[in-house]
Amino acid sequence: QVQLQESGPGLVRPGGTLSLTCTVSGGSISSINWWTWVRQPPGKGLEWIGEISHSGKTDYNPSLRSRVNISVDRSKNLFSLEMTSVTAADTAMYYCVKMSSGWTGFDFWGQGTLVTVSS
Amino acid sequence: DIQMTQSPSSLSASVGDRVTITCRASQAMGMYLHWFQQKPGKAPKLLINGASSLQSGVPSRFSGSGIGTDFTLTISSLQPEDFAIYYCQQTYSTPYTFGQGTRLEIK
């Protein structure tokens, strides 16, 4: 059973860079999956940020593409999210998620980590 | 982008009721439609994938149907633990998009 665990700073200054990692256990990050980030502002709905495939191909939400980078560290079995030039609008719960295929959907989620953008 | 519209946005129901939540997509997307349940302070939980495939461990009172642009999630007999927010989501094309959510409350 795959498990995902997010980690990173809970507070980021406006204009700074948000950096989160997602450690994968119970499976290899090189297996055929898409590793994904989703966020949820407090009291609001879910937004797909982007994904990285098992082969390293990335795809991002056009609304965030200019500020986001997702990468994989196969030696540590984790993947990461970097978001630059953050504002208060980026305050949200950030989830890392595994998608086995477009048909299976987002089948495993981390517990989420709250990131607040504030000075 | 494919826009996902859920209705209703909120719903009050009683234990034992049958409820249906609808999700409409702005363009046809086959059956790449999934349903999630989210409880306060928790990550969303995948209930149904591929429009109608029940995830392992999900009670059989949950069911999904639909194809193309119109989809439904039905709970045949509400239980106390079913009161939550439900989201639909498409993975037909990126950017993957979610419905705005349906809050299911106790009447």
Image (cartoon, coloured by chain):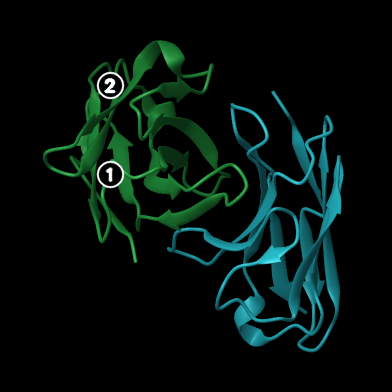
Position of residue A38 measured from the top left corner of the image (x, y, whole percent): 45, 40
Residue A35: give x, y in percent of width and height.
Answer: 38, 40
Mark 2 residue element: loop
Q: Give the chain letter at badge 2.
A: A
Position of residue B59 in the picture relative to residue B23 (left or right): left
Horizontally, residue A96 falls left or right of residue A72, namely right
Viewer-closest of B38 and B107 = B38
In the image, residue B61 above or below residue A52: below
Determine the image quadrant of residue B90.
top right
State the separation of the CA atoms marked 2 and 1. 32 Å
As drawn, which residue projects farthest toward the left?
A: A75
**Marks 2, 1: nearer the viewer:** 1
Check contact, mark 2 vs mark 1: CB within 8 A: no
Badge 1: residue crowd in 10 Å (few <14, some 14–19, many ≥20): many
Three-letter amino acid code of the residue under disc 2: Pro
Q: Quadrant of residue A20?
A: top left
Q: Residue at x 41, y 10 (%)?
A: A66
Specify which label sits upstream in the sequence, 2 or 1. 2
Residue for badge 1:
A29
Which residue matches tag 2? A14
Colour assigned to chain B in the rendering is: cyan
User: Which residue: 33% across, 45% down?
Assistant: A31
Image x and y of residue B103, in percent:
69, 61
Q: Quick check: A56 left or right of B96?
A: left
Look at the picture and state if A50 lies above or below B82: above
- Vertically, is B35 above or below B56? above
Q: Are marks 2 and 1 on the same chain?
A: yes
